[in-house]
Amino acid sequence: MTEATSATHWRLQTEADGVAWLIIDKANAAVNSLSREVMEELDGILTSLTRTPPKALIVSSAKNGFIAGADIKGFVGIESPDQAYQMIRQGQLVIDKLAALRCVTVAAINGFALGGGLEVALACRYRVAADDPSVTLGFPEVQLGVHPGLGGTVRAVQLAGPIAAMDLMLTGRHIRPKQALQMNLVDKLAPPAQLHAVARQVALNPPPAKSPSLKNRLLNLGLVRPILAGQMRSQVARRVRPDHYPAPYKLIELWQEYGASGDRAYEAEARSMGNLLCTPTSRNLVRVFFLQERLKSTGKSGGEPIKHVHVIGAGVMGGDIASWCAARGLTVTLQDREEKYVAPAMERARKFFEKRYPDEAKRNEVLGRLKADVAGEGVPRADLVIEAIFENLDAKRELYARVEPQLKPNAMLATNTSSIVLEQLAEKLAQPERLIGLHFFNPVARMPLVEVIQAANTDQKQVQSGLGFARQIDKLAIPCRSAPGFLVNRVLMPYLSEAVRAAQEGVPLALIDRAAEEFGMPMGPIELADVVGLDVVMSVGKVFFETGQEVPPVLATRFAQKKFGKKTGEGFYVWQNDKPVKPPYTGQSAPDDLQDRLLLPLVNEAVAVLRQRIVDDPDLIDAGVIFGAGFAPFRGGPLEYARTRGVDAVIARLQELQTAHGDRFAPDEGWDLLR
């Protein structure tokens, strides 16, 4: 094999029989991404290959993964849609050179091929993927408020047909190799160890080119596209609104008008993506992407990995924390007072593993890591003990008194409390500095955030170990100082409390939820209260109701009846098949100020958290509220939303609400920190 070209990020190697290998290995990076420099180098190599094409070209990766997509840093600093269009169009033209090469081209896909990485693969004549669960393909661009921009909106439809391809792009979901093969996005699968050999075989003996099925040709006809596009819009509208997330609607427009055919379709794709990149939605979602990366980095130096976790408390939270840890490869023992309390958690874990692991051997392996442990025999062996019992200070202290003497010298002790400050919990410990908070959110399997809580005297090594543990189990970790409600519950409770007050005033529950959903929240506050649990809302929320005022009867009555929400089958709503049954509200309308009544107290409380330094900076607060409370991501977080709306405008509106509804709307003293 001879070295024809060696650039910073690419290698071109040609074998004696004329087969060339174009290998991406982005310098100083753990994964391959398509930065400006990577694309410029690729352009130069492809220009040379256009003049003197090899017998065949195989595009592959030297890293454990093909290409993760565009380098998102390149989206920052774009000032205008025209500037964005020029950047995207240049990228398209580079990929077009790959598609136009006068030789057989094959993409050898290992690991992930996402976004621009998949678009590079689609520009090759053939694609061979390693048949391995680690291989994922997809177009996640909608999560950044855009759609594919390097020809993906055209080539994906041409290969997979409009229904399958558009669904992949509209949802941003990932698919595995077998699905990709069925969709015609991949031509052949290979055992991972034989990927290069099979790719070479395809390059030297190319199979006949596949043509679109008759069904897909018919669905792509100009007369049919408007009908199918209307159905797509209806499906998208069930999830997102066009004023909140315009990208999926623009994607449908592109396909309806151009049918994924011709040069005009590529040019229109670039123009559309250029416009989208400059929308507030995309700018905020790009910001959220970097906030997520920052949270991922907080636990990188967490010390020795945890191997054995012991969870005490097999309720919904404790049981689900235990099953999640087992799914992430840890040995887990789960303790409660009696076997009858542990058994339901073990059954929930079994059902969770059945959904997550279709392969029986893998499922049994994970189940084998989770053990019921009523006697607490796992405590002395555990690297981490997580207390997840009910919210009662005396009960937790009594538990710590029994557990602490059994702990290994270097073991971590953590609480999943959602409301009690660490100083009170640690007061009677022999080593109070070892207690940290690891506050998970419900449902554990879906909520990505863990608050890592520290008191004033907490050992910083314990805090760092807690951050490292959160990352070890693939959660986003945010460090918080101990205070009532910490970050997420602290900002959520004024929001939930105002929703309860509105309900007490007679505003229909579903209308209250609708006001928040129209702002962009994934679910309304009444539904959220049911999901969190009205018992938790009561425990945390008493602090937030006005001093001397009783908890509104609309909440207190349900609590007294033990109607705690989703976990008991009824709260504010009756729950059937994991969904709330919302009564109709035909003919009724919400108060004009309801949306601001709900959301601005949340924003105001986020300012208070910043002023009191419960969390270190505004970006971390925004990240925590997005990933822990589901605050509308396209708005960038509560503090970013306040900046966008205007600090003075928000303060003035809070003062108006204060005059109309009471001092709970009084602007916090910390607003100057955002100016």
Image (cartoon, helix red, strand yellow):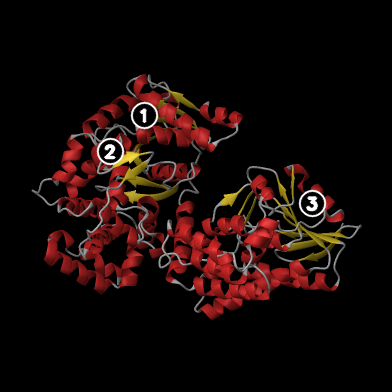
| Left or right of 379 on screen, residue 21 | right
Q: Nearer the viewer, mark 3 or mark 2?
A: 2
Give the residue displayed 19% in from the left and 44% down from the top.
555
Q: Amino acid at mark 1?
A: Ala
Residue 570 numbered tag: 2
Tell me if residue 143 comes above or below residue 304 in the rendering.
below
Q: CA distance from mark 1 to mark 3?
A: 50 Å
Q: Which residue is mark 3?
A: 199
The N terminus is located in which quarter? bottom right
Can you see residue 547? Answer: yes
Q: CA distance from mark 1 to mark 2?
A: 21 Å
Q: Amino acid at mark 2?
A: Glu
The C terminus is located in which quarter? bottom left
Give the residue displayed 55% in from the left and 58% down from the top.
140
Residue 413 numbered tag: none
Q: Which residue is mark 1?
A: 314
| Left or right of 392 on screen, residue 566 | right
